[in-house]
Image (cartoon, helix red, strand yellow):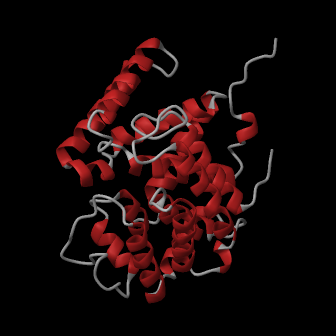
C-alpha cells in the first residue's frame, strides 16, 4: 500500500472528497455559479505543504497559514471547515493513535492559538456565520479556544469536534467510511453513501446557518429516505439519490451540505493516514478490452 506524507494525506483527502459525486456539492460533474471544481483542486494542493509542517507548529499557526495559502491560491473560501478539522489531526505524530493524540493537541491550545484561529476565520469570511452574543468571531479572540468552540458546538459540527475531541469524526464518520469501503472497491460510492448517512444522522450545520433549522432537518429526512430506498448501486437508491441532489441544488446552492462534506474529508484523512484507504486500489476499474 502507498505511504503518503501527512501533507499528501491532507491533499488527497480533499481531492477524493470533492471528486466524489456527493449530493448537493461541487464535484467533477457539477459546479456552482461562484465555485468550480478547479477552485477546490487548487486549494487542496495549496494546503499540503502547510499540513506537512503541522506537527512542528502551533495549531493556530497551522490553521492561519493554510487559510492564507488558500486565499493566495484561489482568492476565496473553499476549505475553512476542512482546515479546522484537518489541522488537529495532522498535528498528531503518526505513531500516536488519533483518539488520544487529538485530545492532547486540543488540550494544549492557548491564547495564541485562539488568536490565530479567529484571524483565519475572519480571513476566510465563511457564509452564514451571523452574530452571536458570546465569542463572536468579529470581536476579540478569547483566551480559551475550546470554550469558544463549546459555545458554538450546537450550531456547528466542526466546532463540536473541538468540544468533543473529534468524537463524530473518529467514532462515526471514519468507521462508517471504513465499513463502506470494505463492502465495495468503488471508493466514490463509499464516500457518497457515508455522506448520505452522515446527513441523515447529523442535520447539516451549514444548511442550518444559511437556511434555518427546519430546512436542515428536512435535508436530514430526505437523506434518510435515500438510505431506505435501496442499497448503493440499485436503481431505487440511484433515483432517490438523484432526487435528493435535485432538491439540495434547487435553492441556488444555499442548501449545500458543506459541513457534512468537511466531515467526509476528515474521515478520508484518517483512512489515508492510518492506511486503510489506498486510493490507487479503491476504485472500480473497467477491464481493458
Residue 147, relative to residue 180: is it above or below? below
Left-right relation of 249 to 75: left
Residue 285, relative to residue 179: is it above or below? above
Picture quadrant where residue 179 is located: top right
For the residue pair 21 and 88, the one nearer the viewer reads as: 21
Left-right relation of 202 to 97: left
Left-right relation of 170 to 92: left
**Which image quarter holds the N terminus?**
top right
Residue 280, relative to residue 154: is it above or below? above
Image coordinates of residue 22 in percent, x first then y, are 47, 35
Please tell me which residue is depicted at 22% across the width and 48% down the height of the picture. Answer: 211
Please tell me which residue is depicted at 28% across the width and 58% down the height of the picture. Answer: 128
Image coordinates of residue 234 in percent, x first then y, are 48, 14
For the residue pair 167 and 254, the one nearer the viewer reads as: 254
For the residue pair 212 and 252, the one nearer the viewer reads as: 252
Please tell me which residue is depicted at 30% across the width and 38% down the height of the picture. Answer: 220
Image coordinates of residue 44 in percent, x first then y, are 60, 55
Number of numbered discs visible in the structure rendering: 0
**Which image quarter holds the C terminus?**
top right
Please tell me which residue is depicted at 39% across the width and 17% down the height of the picture. Answer: 239
Amino acid at each position: 500500500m502507498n505511504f503518503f506524507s501527512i501533507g499528501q494525506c491532507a491533499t488527497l483527502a480533499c481531492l477524493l472528497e470533492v471528486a466524489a459525486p456527493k449530493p448537493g456539492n461541487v464535484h467533477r460533474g457539477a459546479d456552482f455559479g461562484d465555485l468550480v471544481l478547479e477552485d477546490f483542486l487548487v486549494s487542496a494542493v495549496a494546503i499540503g505543504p502547510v499540513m506537512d509542517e503541522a506537527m512542528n507548529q502551533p495549531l493556530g499557526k497551522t490553521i492561519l497559514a493554510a487559510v492564507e495559502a488558500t486565499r493566495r491560491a484561489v482568492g476565496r473560501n473553499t476549505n475553512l471547515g476542512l482546515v479546522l478539522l484537518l489541522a488537529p489531526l495532522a498535528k498528531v505524530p503518526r505513531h500516536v493513535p488519533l483518539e488520544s493524540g487529538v485530545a492532547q493537541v486540543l488540550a494544549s491550545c492557548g491564547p495564541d492559538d485562539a488568536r490565530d484561529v479567529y484571524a483565519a476565520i475572519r480571513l476566510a469570511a465563511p457564509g452564514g456565520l451571523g452574530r452571536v452574543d458570546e465569542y463572536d468571531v468579529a470581536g476579540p479572540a478569547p483566551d480559551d479556544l475550546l470554550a469558544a468552540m463549546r459555545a458554538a458546538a450546537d450550531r456547528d459540527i466542526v466546532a463540536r469536534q473541538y468540544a468533543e475531541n473529534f468524537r463524530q469524526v473518529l467514532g462515526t464518520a471514519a468507521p462508517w467510511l471504513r465499513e463502506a469501503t470494505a463492502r465495495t472497491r468503488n471508493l466514490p460510492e463509499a464516500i457518497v453513501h457515508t455522506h448520505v448517512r452522515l446527513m441523515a444522522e447529523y442535520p447539516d450545520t451549514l444548511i442550518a446557518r444559511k437556511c434555518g433549522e427546519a430546512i436542515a432537518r428536512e435535508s436530514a429526512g430526505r437523506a434518510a429516505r435515500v438510505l431506505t430506498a435501496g442499497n448503493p448501486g440499485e436503481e431505487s437508491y440511484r433515483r432517490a439519490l438523484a432526487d435528493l441532489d435535485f432538491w439540495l441544488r434547487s435553492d441556488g446552492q444555499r442548501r449545500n451540505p458543506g459541513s457534512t462534506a468537511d466531515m467526509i474529508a476528515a474521515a478520508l484523512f484518517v483512512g489515508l493516514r492510518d492506511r486503510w484507504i489506498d486510493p490507487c486500489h479503491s476504485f472500480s476499474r473497467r477491464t481493458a478490452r
